[in-house]
Amino acid sequence: MPLLHRLSFRQLLVVAFLLIAALVAAVSLRGLVGLERLVAESRHGAEEAAALAGQLQRIGEQAATMERAARQFLVLDDAALRERFDTAADELKRTLAALGAALPAPSRAAWDAQLAGIAALLEGPRNTALAREQTLALAFRELDGLRNQLDERIQQVTDARSRALLDGLEQGRDRLVRQVLAAVLGAVLLALAFGVWLARPLARLEAAMVGLGANRLDLPIDIRGPADVQRLSRRLDWLRQRLAEIDADKSRFLRHLSHELKTPLAALREGVAVLEEGVAGELSEAQREVAAILRHNTAVVQRQIEDLLDFNAAAFEARRLVRRKVELGALLDRVVSEQRLQWQARRLPVQREGGPVWAEVDADKLATALGNLLSNAIRFSPVGAPIHLALALQGDRALIDVVDAGPGIDPDDHDRVFEPFYRGRRQPHDAPRGSGIGLSIVQEVVTAHAGTIALRPSTRGTHFRIELPHATVR
């Protein structure tokens, strides 16, 4: 595998395609060679069958020539006719010899004996010619019988060769089918092997990117695979280190900023307190008013600094999840119970329905987000107005609805309601002004769980809906 790790993703794809093409080409070439061999055998068999048929025809012609010459010789006793007979007999013997394996030794011996017997019938006195002619006719009929046997024998040989050729074709076809199936299976296995081997580092890259998005910056990124994937892995690890450094720098900056601002603010508040106590002399009414303004504004600035630090800490912690399977209905009941004093003090009936629904979540962080939504609903609800909490399962997503009967959110604020430190136009008159980070923290926590939070249309009050993925009824 070290050699493969030196190749790029594209080069590995080319190697995979070449290996698959070579496998298919090898099977095709083997099939072509086998087909050529079968064609050559078929051609050779056809030529041999034609040659045997021609030889059998010549045997018939030569036997007919012998019979005609022998009969005429017995009648005319002409030496030329005897010579014609001998010539035809010699040609017949040569033709029989050319048959080779098509004519077994016993059949060849029968032919030789019959030819010798016919030749012997041509010898003798003329007064026995008539009797010998009758015997000669019987001998040639026996020779025709041998020729018919030879015809059957040649037909059997031809049929056997045809069957052997057909068997060869069948075997070749079966072998080719097996080779093609093996090639297809090999190509599929090769493609699957390369696909899995190439997809695995991509899946690890995706997991590493998801980890970066989830702010898991303490896990080194080291992915083995093609050269370009390893190069990308090193870049991602460099990015992880840079993000960790940026987070550390941001935390240091906020700590330094907090320290640098809180110290003069504390001194300023102490100075204002000293002035208001009259340590430096009695203050006039106008001076007391200025001192009160200074005290209020320094308190506001300090609270804003603390809100900024709290939001950054909460946003950072929201991305560090410890998931476990939780029944969301029980989690909602816990949140409602923890804020019982607040909603009972304002005589707000809290109605909770739905469940059970289970999901893999960080229970503490999700409880913080739900607590912020409930606290927001308590703060904005008029005395005695109901607060409605609903839990439902839609497909594989858990739906959590928080609905109050307060003044609602101004339409112009809908797009900015989840922005940090943004306060809407509609604020309750009987409650202190909020920090503007509660809903931002809710969104951070829900987003870290791969969920969504949205402001839903409502005829009265405010309706927030949280959707969490991968939920079940058990």
Image (tube, rainbow, N blue to C red):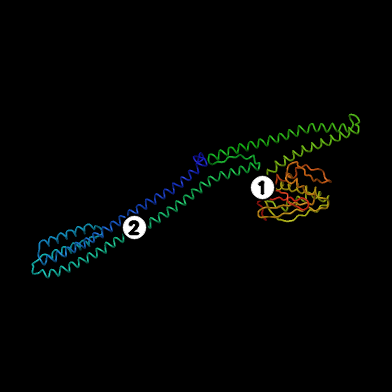
Question: Which residue is painted at 22% across and 64% down in the image?
Answer: 147
User: Picture quarter containing residue 230?
Assistant: top right
- 425 versus 50 height, above or below: above
Q: Nearer the viewer, residue 421 or 341?
A: 421
**Label of residue 450 in the image:** 1
Percent coordinates x, y for residue 244 in the rendering:
65, 37
Percent coordinates x, y for residue 103 in the rendering:
24, 60
Label 1 close to label 2 by CB (< 8 Å): no
Give neighbour class at mark 1: few <14, some 14-19, many 20+ (Cα, 10 Å).
few
User: Which of pointers 1 and 2 lies earlier in the amino acid sequence?
Assistant: 2
User: Picture quarter containing residue 248?
Assistant: top right
Give neighbour class at mark 2: few <14, some 14-19, many 20+ (Cα, 10 Å).
some
Is 274 on the left or on the right of 202, as rendered? right
Question: Which residue is painted at 13% across and 66% down in the image?
Answer: 72
Residue closest to the far top: 280
Percent coordinates x, y for residue 36 in the rendering:
35, 52
Secondary element under disc 1, as helix, strand or loop, is: loop
Quadrant location of the C terminus in the rendered image = bottom right
**Disc count in the image?**
2
Is 349 on the left or on the right of 165, as rendered? right
Q: Which residue is mark 2?
A: 165
- Amino acid marked by disc 1: Ala
**Label of residue 160 in the image:** none
Percent coordinates x, y for residue 455 in the rendering:
73, 49
Is 387 on the left or on the right of 249, as rendered? right
Instruction: Give the Cα distance between marks 1 and 2.
Output: 70 Å
- Amino acid marked by disc 2: Leu
